[in-house]
């Protein structure tokens, strides 16, 4: 399965690395499960050629427009840096990456997010009429901002 990990400036370092570690571990252990090859081909995608994490680490990325002609089967959005809920809403509102999420959704790409990353999916409108979850401490702001998401 081709998986794109979507990245934005200021994202939570541990949210990104946890996702990458889980996928890499699954690939490393796939032989023990009797699989012929690694189940995940992982691409780290961003708006440009690099992002800077919440702790200032610079990470090389594949610019997401390059994925348009050959989209992944799954795109996952890690959490953005730890911020008060109002700051998360302000950060996500009008973000350049929302159009990419909409494009991926329209192309039939499966979408997933962790923690505050769900705000990107909801803001892009791809969760309207669907059931979703986010972290407990973010749920009041999430429900207020996205009433069409159950």
Image (cartoon, helix red, strand yellow):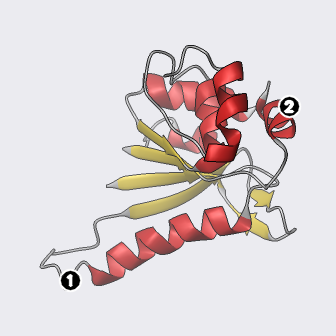
- The image position of residue 126, as x and y in percent, is 52, 23
Residue furthest out toward the left: 34
Rendering quarter of residue 99: top right
Q: Earlier in the sequence, mark 1 or mark 2?
A: 1
Callout 1 crowding tier (Cα within 10 Å): few <14, some 14–19, many ≥20: few
For the N terminus, the quadrant is bottom left
Rendering quarter of residue 116: top right
Rendering quarter of residue 31: bottom left
Q: Are marks 1 and 2 in contact (CB under 8 Å)?
A: no
Tell me the CA gap for discs 1 and 2.
44 Å
- The image position of residue 66, as x and y in percent, is 57, 43
Q: Residue 23 vs residue 102: left or right?
A: left
- The image position of residue 40, as x and y in percent, is 35, 64
Q: Residue 132 vs residue 50: left or right?
A: left
Residue 60 can be seen, yes or no = yes
Look at 40% across and 78% down and name the residue there: 25
Look at 39% across and 63% down and name the residue there: 41
Does 63 sit above or below residue 101? below
Look at 62% across and 45% down and name the residue there: 136
Q: Which residue is mark 2?
A: 90
Does 100 sit above or below residue 51? above
Q: Which residue is mark 1?
A: 31
The kind of secondary structure element at disc 1 is: loop
- The image position of residue 95, as x and y in percent, is 78, 31
Does 72 sit above or below residue 129? below
The kind of secondary structure element at disc 2 is: helix
């Amino acid at each position: 399965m081709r998986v794109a990990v979507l990245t934005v400036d200021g994202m939570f370092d541990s949210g990104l690395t946890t996702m990458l570690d889980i996928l890499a571990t699954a690939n490393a252990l796939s032989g023990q499960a009797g699989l012929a090859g690694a189940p995940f081909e992982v691409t780290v995608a961003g708006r440009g050629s690099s992002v800077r994490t919440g702790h200032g680490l610079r990470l090389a990325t594949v610019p997401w427009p390059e994925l348009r002609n050959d989209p992944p089967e799954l795109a996952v959005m890690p959490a953005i840096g730890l911020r008060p809920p109002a700051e998360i809403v302000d950060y996500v509102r009008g973000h350049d990456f929302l159009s990419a999420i909409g494009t991926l959704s329209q192309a039939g790409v499966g979408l997933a997010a962790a923690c505050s990353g769900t705000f990107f999916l909801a803001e892009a409108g791809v969760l309207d009429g669907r059931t979703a979850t986010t972290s407990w401490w973010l749920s009041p702001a999430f429900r207020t901002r996205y009433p069409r998401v159950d």
